[in-house]
Image: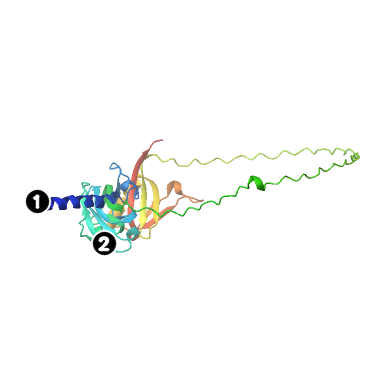
């Protein structure tokens, strides 16, 4: 008798469980929002120190996440965008890219997340190949349709209401007298002055801009106020920047660093440099490439 009752309960409960699971779909919530970190390609990567802010495409409850990197990655969850709003907690993803499930009792699982900050536990340099966050978006939500305005039909006159058209008399055209042509005397031609030759201006030679070649990199620096600065530099100058940054991080060296703007020099100047202050740097990103002449 107990087995029979158990079978009846399972038959009634399983369809309800299926309906509940079908009402939502697990989707990636940061796809394509942070360049090479979220482009779906684990052969591309971003190396940075400090932290990186990533906004979700839509505020959602997070059920799982992962990170493919050279070190374990900490995920700090916030309710607002760009790491603002309420701080919801921190969870760690292994470097292998294995998906980590958020416990259903966790605040992150039950509260809408707007953004995350990823970093290495001691804010040291980390290389991230791919990061993903998964959550459930309600699949039954449909937009409210806008009311459709029904066009007003134009009444068609009945055959009985039509009236015979009234014929208007045709006006007889009046012949206008032709005007007598007026003879205009021919003008005496004026002698044309011979133009004096203008002096020929010798064009100034155009300076050919420097064509970069060899191993190079795009250095993108994000300041604490949100401003981004981008520099196209030889790899040797990028290495010099990294050496200064690591030394200053250890408490040695000057507090600022001069970056040569090279072909970005605008104006009548021989050379222009940007001076970046160590304490104002939030993150930096290096994208290496090679050019040929």
Give the mark nearer the N terminus: 1 vs 2: 1
Residue 265 or residue 183, whichever sits in front: 183
Quarter of the image for the C terminus: give it: top left
Q: Secondary structure at mark 2?
A: strand
Q: Which residue is mark 1?
A: 3
Residue 250 lies in what quarter of the image?
A: bottom left
Q: Are marks 1 and 2 in contact (CB under 8 Å)?
A: no
Which of the two discs, 1 and 2, sits closer to the camera? 1
Residue at image position (63%, 47%) is 158
Residue 116 screen position, x and y as percent: 29, 56
Residue 130 screen position, x and y as percent: 28, 47
Residue 182 or residue 233, whichever sits in front: 182
Residue farthest bottom in this picture: 86
Number of the label disc, if any, that sits on residue 88: 2
Left-right relation of 127 to 219:
left
Number of the label disc, if any, that sits on residue 207: none
Residue at image position (22%, 56%) is 91
Residue 142 or residue 166, whichever sits in front: 166
Left-right relation of 204 to 31:
right
């Amino acid at each position: 008798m107990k087995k029979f009752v158990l079978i009846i309960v399972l038959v009634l409960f399983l369809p309800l469980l299926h309906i509940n699971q079908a009402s939502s779909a697990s989707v990636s919530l940061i796809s394509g929002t942070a360049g090479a970190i979220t482009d779906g390609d684990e052969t591309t990567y971003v190396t940075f120190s400090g932290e990186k802010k990533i906004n979700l495409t839509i505020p959602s409850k997070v059920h799982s996440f992962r990170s493919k990197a050279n070190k374990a990655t900490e995920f700090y969850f916030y309710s607002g965008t760009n790491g603002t709003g309420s701080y919801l907690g921190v969870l760690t993803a292994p470097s292998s890219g294995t998906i980590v499930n958020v416990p259903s009792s966790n605040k992150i699982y039950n509260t809408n997340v707007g953004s995350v900050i990823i970093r290495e536990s001691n804010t040291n340099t980390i290389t991230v190949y791919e990061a993903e966050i998964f959550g459930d978006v309600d699949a039954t939500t449909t937009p409210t349709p806008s009311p459709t305005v029904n066009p007003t039909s134009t009444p068609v006159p009945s055959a009985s209401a039509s009236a015979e058209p009234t014929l208007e008399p045709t006006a007889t055209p009046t012949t206008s007298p032709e005007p007598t042509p007026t003879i205009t005397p021919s003008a005496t031609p004026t002698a044309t002055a011979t133009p004096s030759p203008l002096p020929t201006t010798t064009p100034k030679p155009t300076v050919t801009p420097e064509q970069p070649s060899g191993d190079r990199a795009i250095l993108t620096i994000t300041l604490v106020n949100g401003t981004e600065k981008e520099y196209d530099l030889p790899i040797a100058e990028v290495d010099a920047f990294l050496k200064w940054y690591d030394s200053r991080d250890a408490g040695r060296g000057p507090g600022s660093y001069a970056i040569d703007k090279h072909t970005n020099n605008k104006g009548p100047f021989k050379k222009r440099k940007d001076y970046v202050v160590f304490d104002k740097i939030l993150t930096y990103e290096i994208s290496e490439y090679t050019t040929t002449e």
